[in-house]
Image (tube, rainbow, N blue to C red):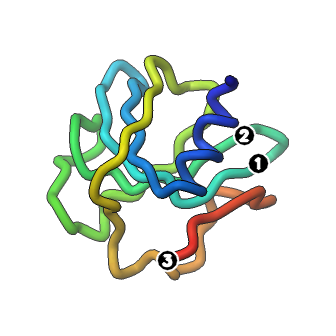
């Protein structure tokens, strides 16, 4: 199964995603999947692991990550608590053409 398909199923089932991006291990909940400038991207809410940009603070509205799908490695999914932030409905600029997004 492709990483894109795995992320799509994780959105449908509201599963957590564990992956490495830019050398950092991340625990995230995918919220939207699609393309921007013809490249596949996923909008995640990161709730655990590491980040190059800022510390991960549980519940913070700054834990949103827009990640190119082809940059993800060691991708796996698991069942677990769904994480999001109150600003989930804020207009996002991560994805131009949304294929699927989570229903809260």
Q: What residue did someone put label 1 on?
A: 35
Q: Secondary structure at mark 2?
A: strand
Above or below: residue 58 compared with residue 46: below
At 49% from the left and 19% from the top, the residue drawn is 73
Q: Is 75 in front, or is 49?
A: 75
At 35% from the left and 67% from the top, the residue drawn is 84
Neighbourhood count class around disc 2 (C-alpha, 10 Å): few under 14, some 14–19, many 20 upward: some
Q: Is residue 79 left or right of residue 60?
A: right
Q: Earlier in the sequence, mark 2 or mark 1?
A: 1
Q: Earlier in the sequence, mark 2 or mark 3?
A: 2
Q: Earlier in the sequence, mark 1 or mark 3?
A: 1
Q: What residue did someone put label 3 on?
A: 104
Place of residue 15 in the rendered image (x, y in percent of width and height, measured from the top left): 43, 49
Place of residue 10 in the rendered image (x, y in percent of width and height, measured from the top left): 53, 47
Q: State the image quarter where residue 4 is shown.
A: top right
Q: Secondary structure at mark 3?
A: loop
At 52% from the left and 26% from the top, the residue drawn is 72
Q: Is 18 in front, or is 53?
A: 18
Above or below: residue 96 compared with residue 46: below
Quadrant showing the N terminus: top right
Q: Is 84 in front, or is 52?
A: 84
């Amino acid at each position: 199964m492709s990483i894109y398909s795995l992320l799509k199923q994780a959105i449908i089932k509201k599963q957590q995603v564990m992956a490495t991006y830019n050398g950092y291990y991340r625990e995230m909940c995918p919220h939207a999947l699609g393309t921007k400038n013809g490249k596949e991207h996923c909008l995640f809410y990161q709730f655990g692991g590491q980040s190059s940009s800022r510390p991960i603070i549980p519940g913070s509205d700054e834990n949103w990550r827009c990640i190119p799908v082809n940059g993800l490695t060691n991708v796996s999914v698991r069942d677990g608590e769904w994480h999001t932030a109150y600003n989930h409905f804020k207009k996002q600029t991560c994805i131009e053409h949304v294929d699927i997004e989570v229903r809260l």
